[in-house]
Amino acid sequence: MDVSQEPAAICVVDGAGALLAEGRVGTCPDAIATWLGCWTPGKIGMETGPLAV
C-alpha cells in the first residue's frame, strides 16, 4: 500500500506473492477500510517514498 500521495495505491497478494487485486482509493482510513473490507485480514505492507516524514 502506497499512501504517500492522493490517491493511495493498494495491491493484494497471496502467500506466494501472486497479485490478486489492485486499485486506488482516497488516502483516508474509511476509504482504505472499505476497499480492503472484502479481503481476509493478513499482513499489510506500507510503501513510503521521499515525501514521507
Image (cartoon, rainbow, N blue to C red):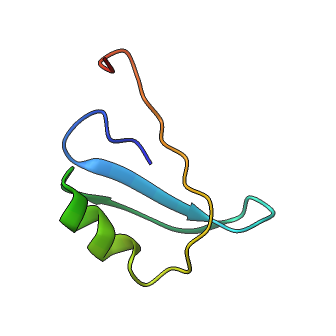
Residue 14 drawn above or below residue 5: below
Q: Nearer the viewer, residue 43 or 19?
A: 43
Residue 34, position as x, y percentages in the image? 28, 75
Could you tell me which quadrant the C terminus lies in? top left
Give me the residue at 77% from left, 66% from top: 15
As drawn, is 52 to the left or to the right of 41? left
Asked if residue 15 lies left or right of residue 10, the reply is: right
Query: Which quadrant holds residue 22?
Result: bottom left
Which quadrant of the structure image shows residue 32?
bottom left
Q: Is residue 31 left or right of residue 46?
A: left
Question: Residue 23: x percent and y percent?
Answer: 37, 62
Tell me how many marks there are: 0
Q: Residue lying farthest bottom?
A: 38
Above/below status of 4 relative to 50: below
Residue plotted at (48% across, 36% down)? 47
* Identity of the residue drawn at 71% across and 64% down: 18
How far from the left and from the top, in percent, is residue 7?
A: 22, 48
Q: Is residue 14 left or right of residue 52?
A: right
Q: Which residue is at 29% across, 48% downward? A: 8
In the depicted view, which residue is nearer to us: 8 or 33?
A: 33
Residue 24 position, x and y percent, is 30, 58
Residue farthest to the right, as pictured = 16
Identify whether 19 is placed above or below 28. Answer: below
